[in-house]
Amino acid sequence: MIHFNEYLDSYVKSDIINEALCTKQDYSKHNYLYPLNAIDILLDNGYLKLGDKGDKGMISGENLTDDEKKQLKYLADTIFDSTPEDFNNAIKSLKTKWNQIFKGTLSGYENGLASKNKGNAFEQYFIDHYSEFENNIKNIISYKELKNIKADGGLNQRRPLTFKKDSITCGNITDYNIGKTVTDVTLETDKGPIYLSLKSGSAVTFVNSGIKKLFTKEFFDGKQLEGDGKTLLNMLCIDENKFRDVFTSYKEKDKRKAKAEKDNIDILKDIQNNKIFEKFIKSVIGYGFIMVHQIKGNDIEYINFLTEKDLNNFISKIKEAYIAYPKPGEAKRVDVFVKYDKIEFKINLRSKTGGIYPTHIMADYKFIK
């Protein structure tokens, strides 16, 4: 048996498969399981372990048909250039084997690849030891009878950027009550469902959406930006020409160690008067849930986002906002920092596939105590 855990670790920590490609719920809900090295090992007739089923769960690349090998090689070679249609058509022909690889039942970990995902580990621990957390939940919303606890994190319901006229929202929503969409653990109680969004880590991502199609080759060649891409940059108060120059002037450097030098441009007044940004942030956070945030170990905070008033309390006043443009050639990303009284955001536009031009917008948050 070939041991390849260290390879899987590196692939899981990087987002090798662009999330934007995973358009079908069957695949997108497992976006943390991307062991492309499993493909390489199968092609080389190596052995993979199926979950924790021991020798009975091992399959060999020798058992793959020529067509399955061809499709695996196609995925490995062209994943970054594939359209969603190409990607899903290639997956269809692999049927069961691809589902096993993608969903993590085929892995080098004793209990499956998902066991190495911190967020999923916290969700499972929370459910198994709910009595330890119950009083903290009841301090926010009290109930008499707990009928059931449901693990809903695996649904991982996607919330892509949605453009409507001059508005941008995270997900196609008509209001900001998104508890049912973002829930990881649902408590079924006598008061109805209580939605819990579980997060783990010092800084956690709210937004992770594809933007590759918004910025074309023609734009980076000098054409004026139009449409949704222009709306997005305007919302973030990003200068179109400076944005373009960051990426077109970037030059790869071997063994780059020095931190990129940046120009920080204050945008506080612009962002304070930006109604599009205000609506966007409301859609990003939303309400209708309790956030259970595991900062580290037993250091856990509970944040009440049950009502729209609770949401508004967190974003009532912007205290600081600026854009960090890297000096020409220094880096291939643009960061926007927005700080409120109780929460601060770092929004960045960058490539998640190792290339130069931006493929994603990501928004990390940190609560201010």
Image: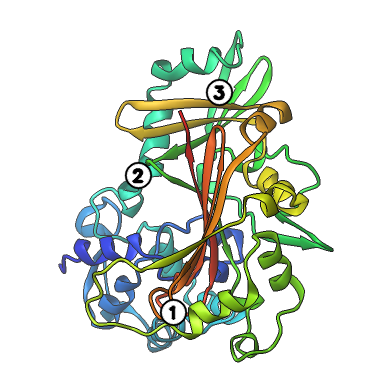
Q: Residue 45 or 113: which is nearer the viewer?
A: 113
Q: What is the x, y in percent for residue 29? A: 53, 55
In this rendering, the answer to whether 277 lies above or below 41 is: above
Point out the tag, 2 or 3, that comes first from the N-terminus.
2
Give the quadrant of residue 51.
bottom left
Between label 1 and label 3, give the one nearer the viewer. 1
Residue 133's label in the rendered image is none
- Label 1 residue SS: loop
- Say which residue label 2 marks: 118
- Residue at 45% x, 80% y is 356
In this rendering, the answer to whether 77 lies above or below 331 is: below
- Label 2 residue SS: helix
Q: Is the residue marked by circle 2 packed among few (<14), some (14-19), or many (20+) residues within 10 Å? A: few
The amino acid type, in three-letter code, at marker 2 is Lys
Q: Which quadrant holds the N terminus?
A: bottom left
From mark 2 to mark 1, how far is it between C-alphas? 37 Å
- Left/right of residue 42 with respect to residue 15 in the rendered view: left
* Residue 90 makes an appearance in the image: no
- Say which residue label 1 marks: 328
Q: What is the x, y in percent for residue 81? A: 51, 84
Q: Residue 221 or 35: which is nearer the viewer?
A: 221
Q: How many marks?
A: 3
Q: What is the x, y in percent for residue 204? A: 45, 45
In this rendering, the answer to whether 273 lies above or below 214 is: above
- Say which residue label 3 marks: 148
Q: Is the residue marked by circle 1 packed among few (<14), some (14-19), or many (20+) residues within 10 Å? A: some
Q: Is the residue marked by circle 3 packed among few (<14), some (14-19), or many (20+) residues within 10 Å? A: few
The amino acid type, in three-letter code, at marker 3 is Asn
Point out the tag, 2 or 1, that comes first from the N-terminus.
2
Between label 2 and label 3, give the one nearer the viewer. 2
